[in-house]
C-alpha cells in the first residue's frame, strides 16, 4: 500500500465508488444499523483498496466488492443471527394459497416492503437481495457467501416465500386482499 | 380427474422451476418447457406474475432507500487520507534515519568541539594559573616590593635593556596605579623566567607579568573574553581568589592579576594590551632579547614551577597551591 501512485487510487475510486450505494443499501438492510453499515462500508473499501493490485480491471468490480463486503460481514454474522427474527416456514399448503394469486403491492409503501423484508431471517434475506435486487447469478452468490450452489437455490426459494408471506400480511394490514382485491371493494362488489 | 392430477403434478413441477426461471438460471430446454406451460396455465402464470411483482416491488423499495452523502464522503476521505498517511509513515522512517545520521554527525562534531573546548579551557586555565601563581608567590607571599616605589632607573636596571622600556608603558597605561617594583623572576628547577611589574592602586596590589610563550598558542574562539577595538584577544579567569586577564603577544603571555573585580581587571588589561603589545613587538623582536639572556638581576621565585612545552600541553611539575591574595595597605 505504501508509495502506490495517486493515479492508482483514482482508478480504484473510478471503479469502486460508483457501487458504494448498492453496497451501503445491502449493508444497512442486513445489519439494520446505519452506523454499523457505514463502518462495514468503510472497512470494505479500505480492504478493497489494499487488495486492488490483485483486481483485474475490466472484470466485475461490483461482484468483487460484494464478495469483500460479505467476507467482512462474516465477522458480524453471529450478532446478526442473534438479533434476527427466526422465522419458521409455513407448510406447502399455506404457501401455495398465497403464492397462487398475484399480490397487489402498488399501494404499499417502500418502507412497509422493507419492513417486511427485515422480518425475513438474514440467511434468506441476503440471498433474496443478492438475487432479486442486485441480480447476481447463483454462481456469484455461492462464491460471495462461500456456500454450495444448491444451498443458494434452496435459500432463495425459501426466502422469496417468506417475503411473500410477510407482504401478504402487510397487504392485509393495508386492507388489501392479497388475491388482488381491496377489502372494501370486495364487499361492495 | 386423471387429467387434473396430471396437470397438477405438471404445475407442481413447473413451479419448482419458477424461482430459477425468474432468476434466468434455467437451461434453455427447461426454460422452453416452462414457457410452454405458462402459455397454457393461468394459475402458474399468476404465480409467476406474483413473484415478479414482489421482486419489482423489492427492487423499487431498495432503490429508493437513500444513501447518506456522509457515507460516500467518509469513504473517499478515508481512502485519500490513507495515501499521504502511508507515505508519511514510510517517510517518517526515512526521516528518522536521516535525522539520526545528522544527529550522530552533529554529536560527533559537538563532542569534538566540546573536547577541543575542554582542552582549550584547560590550556587557558593552566597558562592563566602561571600568572596567578607568579603574582601570589612573588608579590603577595614573598612581598618582593617596597612600600615606597623604587626609582624608575633602578627598576629599568633590574629589567635589563630589553625590557626597560616597558616600565613607561606600564606606568602610563595603568592609570591610578603606581609601579612599586619591576624585576625578572626565576623559578628554581625551571627554565621559565618572567618579567614582573608590581603596582599599587585602588587599595590593592596588581601585578603585570610577562612570561615567554615558548611556542605555545592560546586557543581562540569562544575562550576569548574580549578582543577589544585593537583586535587583541583577552583571556580572563578567576583562580585562587584572584582575577586575571591576559593576552598573548608575539613572544609572551602577558597577565594582569589582582583581587579587584573581574571587570576592573579586564578593563585594565584592555587598556594596557595595545601599547604593551606594540612595545614588546619593537623591543623583543629577536631571540636575543628573550628572558633567558636578561637575568642579570633576577629574583628567585620558590613557588610554582610550571613548564611550558613547545606543544599545546602543559604540565605542572610541582609547587604549593596558590594562596589567596590579601589586601595590602598603601605604604
Image (cartoon, grey):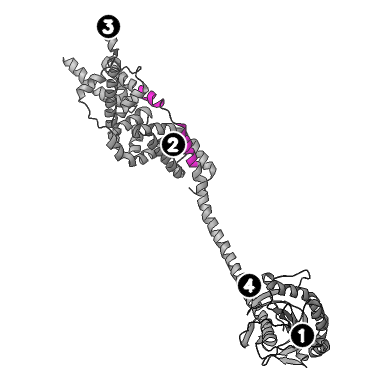
Task: Look at 82% across and 78% down and name the residue there.
Answer: B172
Q: Is residue A152 left or right of residue B297?
A: left
Q: Residue furthest top?
A: A189
Residue at 28% from the left image edge and 24% from the top image edge: A166
| Quarter of the image with the C terminus of chain B in it | bottom right
Tell me if I can see residue B28 in this picture.
Answer: no
Picture layout, residue B143 above or below residue A1: below
The chain under label 4 reads B
- Callout 2: few (<14), some (14-19), or many (20+) C-alpha neighbours within 10 Å? some
Discs 4 and 1 share one subunit: yes
Q: Secondary structure at mark 2?
A: helix
Give the label on residue A61, or none. Answer: 2
In depth, the one of A128 and B1 nearer the eye is: A128
Q: CA distance from mark 3 to mark 4?
A: 113 Å
Crowding at dot 4, Cα within 10 Å, few <14 / some 14-19 / many 20+, comes out as: some
How much space separates mark 3 and mark 1, taking CA atoms?
144 Å
Q: CA distance from mark 3 to mark 2?
A: 54 Å
Please give left or right for residue A110 compared with residue A158 in the image: right
Mark closer to the observer (3, 1): 1
The residue singled out by tag 4 in the image is B117
Q: Could you say which quadrant of the image residue B71 lies in?
A: top left
Q: Which residue is mark 1?
A: B180
Q: Which residues are magenta?
A: B57-79
The answer to whether residue B158 is visible is yes
Amino acid at each position: 500500500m505504501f508509495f502506490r501512485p495517486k493515479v492508482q487510487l483514482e482508478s480504484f475510486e473510478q471503479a469502486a465508488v460508483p457501487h458504494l450505494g448498492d453496497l451501503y443499501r445491502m449493508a444497512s438492510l442486513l445489519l439494520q444499523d446505519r452506523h454499523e453499515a457505514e463502518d462495514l462500508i468503510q472497512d470494505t473499501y479500505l480492504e478493497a483498496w489494499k487488495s486492488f493490485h490483485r483486481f483485474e480491471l475490466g472484470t466485475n468490480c461490483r461482484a468483487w466488492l460484494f464478495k469483500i463486503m460479505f467476507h467482512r460481514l462474516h465477522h458480524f454474522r453471529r450478532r446478526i443471527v442473534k438479533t434476527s427474527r427466526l422465522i419458521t416456514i409455513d407448510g406447502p399448503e399455506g404457501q401455495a394459497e398465497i403464492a397462487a394469486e398475484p399480490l397487489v403491492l402498488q399501494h404499499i409503501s417502500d418502507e412497509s416492503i422493507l419492513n417486511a423484508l427485515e422480518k425475513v431471517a438474514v440467511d434468506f434475506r441476503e440471498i433474496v437481495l443478492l438475487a432479486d435486487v442486485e441480480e447476481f447469478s447463483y454462481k456469484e452468490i455461492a462464491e460471495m457467501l462461500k456456500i454450495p450452489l444448491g444451498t443458494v437455490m434452496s435459500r432463495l426459494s425459501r426466502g422469496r416465500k417468506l417475503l411473500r408471506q410477510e407482504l401478504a400480511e402487510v397487504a392485509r394490514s393495508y386492507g388489501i386482499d392479497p388475491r388482488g382485491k381491496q377489502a372494501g371493494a370486495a364487499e361492495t362488489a | 380427474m386423471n387429467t387434473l392430477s396430471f396437470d397438477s403434478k405438471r404445475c407442481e413441477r413447473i413451479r419448482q422451476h419458477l424461482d430459477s426461471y425468474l432468476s434466468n438460471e434455467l437451461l434453455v430446454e427447461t426454460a422452453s418447457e416452462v414457457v410452454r406451460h405458462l402459455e397454457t396455465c393461468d394459475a402458474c402464470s399468476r404465480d409467476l406474475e406474483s413473484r415478479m411483482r414482489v421482486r419489482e416491488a423489492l427492487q423499487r423499495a431498495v432503490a429508493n432507500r437513500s444513501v447518506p452523502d456522509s457515507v460516500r464522503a467518509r469513504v473517499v476521505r478515508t481512502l485519500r487520507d490513507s495515501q499521504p498517511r502511508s507515505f508519511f509513515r514510510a517517510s517518517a522512517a526515512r526521516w528518522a534515519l536521516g535525522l539520526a545520521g545528522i544527529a550522530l554527525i552533529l554529536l560527533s562534531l559537538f563532542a569534538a568541539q566540546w573536547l577541543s573546548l575542554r582542552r582549550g579551557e584547560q590550556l587557558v586555565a593552566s597558562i592563566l594559573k602561571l600568572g596567578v601563581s607568579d603574582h601570589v608567590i612573588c608579590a603577595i607571599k614573598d612581598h618582593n616590593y617596597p612600600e615606597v616605589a623604587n626609582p624608575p632607573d633602578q627598576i629599568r636596571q633590574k629589567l635589563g635593556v630589553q625590557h626597560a622600556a616597558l616600565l613607561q608603558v606600564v606606568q602610563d597605561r595603568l592609570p591610578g596605579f603606581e609601579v612599586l617594583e619591576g624585576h625578572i623572576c626565576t623559578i628554581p628547577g625551571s627554565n621559565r623566567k618572567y618579567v614582573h611589574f608590581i603596582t599599587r592602586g585602588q587599595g590593592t596590589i596588581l601585578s603585570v607579568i610577562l612570561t615567554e610563550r615558548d611556542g605555545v598558542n592560546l586557543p581562540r574562539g569562544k575562550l576569548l573574553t574580549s578582543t577589544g577595538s585593537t583586535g587583541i584577544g583577552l583571556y580572563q579567569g578567576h583562580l585562587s581568589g584572584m582575577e586575571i586577564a591576559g593576552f598573548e603577544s608575539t613572544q609572551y603571555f602577558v597577565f594582569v592579576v589582582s583581587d579587584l573585580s573581574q571587570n576592573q581587571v579586564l578593563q585594565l588589561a584592555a587598556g594596557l594590551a595595545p601599547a604593551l603589545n606594540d612595545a614588546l613587538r619593537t623591543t623583543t623582536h629577536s631571540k636575543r632579547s628573550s628572558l633567558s639572556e636578561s637575568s642579570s638581576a633576577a629574583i628567585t621565585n620558590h613557588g610554582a614551577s610550571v613548564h611550558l612545552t613547545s606543544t599545546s600541553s602543559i604540565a605542572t611539575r610541582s609547587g604549593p597551591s596558590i594562596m589567596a591574595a590579601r589586601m595590602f595597605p598603601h605604604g
